[in-house]
Image: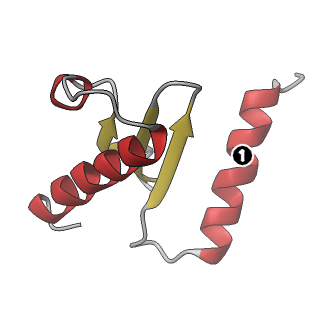
Amino acid sequence: MKLTKNIRKRFRVSNKVKKVAPNDRYRLCISRSAKNISAQIIDDNKHVTLLSASSVEKDIKGLNKVNKTELSKIVAEKLAKKAQEKKI
């Protein structure tokens, strides 16, 4: 069975994380496009996304015109606030 490009990439990332990180460490995944940015905190042992924040959410999208640098700072602050609430 031939593996697709995405599946090979997923195996590569998860194997590197397993080798380097201890079992209690989570992974931060950041995705960005031309207009938006999103971030997730992922538990690789359970294969589950614990938290996420994105510039598409209503409270961030409602802000006046901001550049991508300011937008990424806002998303990072929102993700950090959520992580503190969940004690991650």
Percent coordinates x, y for residue 28 in the rendering: 47, 56
At horizontal 23% and vertical 32% (from top left) the residue drawn is 60
Percent coordinates x, y for residue 21 in the rendering: 55, 74
Q: Quadrant of residue 85?
A: bottom left
Report the side of 53 relative to 27 (left or right): left
Q: Quadrant of residue 65?
A: top left
At horizontal 64% and vertical 76% (from top left) the residue drawn is 20
Residue 44 can be seen in this image? no
Task: Please determine whether, in this image, residue 52 is positioned above or below residue 80.
Answer: above
Percent coordinates x, y for residue 41 in the rendering: 38, 52
Residue 62 can be seen in this image? yes
**Outermost residue to the right:** 2
At horizontal 24% and vertical 26% (from top left) the residue drawn is 57
Percent coordinates x, y for residue 87 in the rendering: 15, 67
- Secondary structure, mark 1, is helix
Task: Please determine whether, in this image, residue 76 is positioned above or below residue 3.
Answer: below
Report the side of 72 relative to 82 (left or right): right
**Outermost residue to the left:** 85
Residue holding disc 1: 11
Is the residue marked by circle 1 packed among few (<14), some (14-19), or many (20+) residues within 10 Å? few
At horizontal 45% and vertical 44% (from top left) the residue drawn is 47
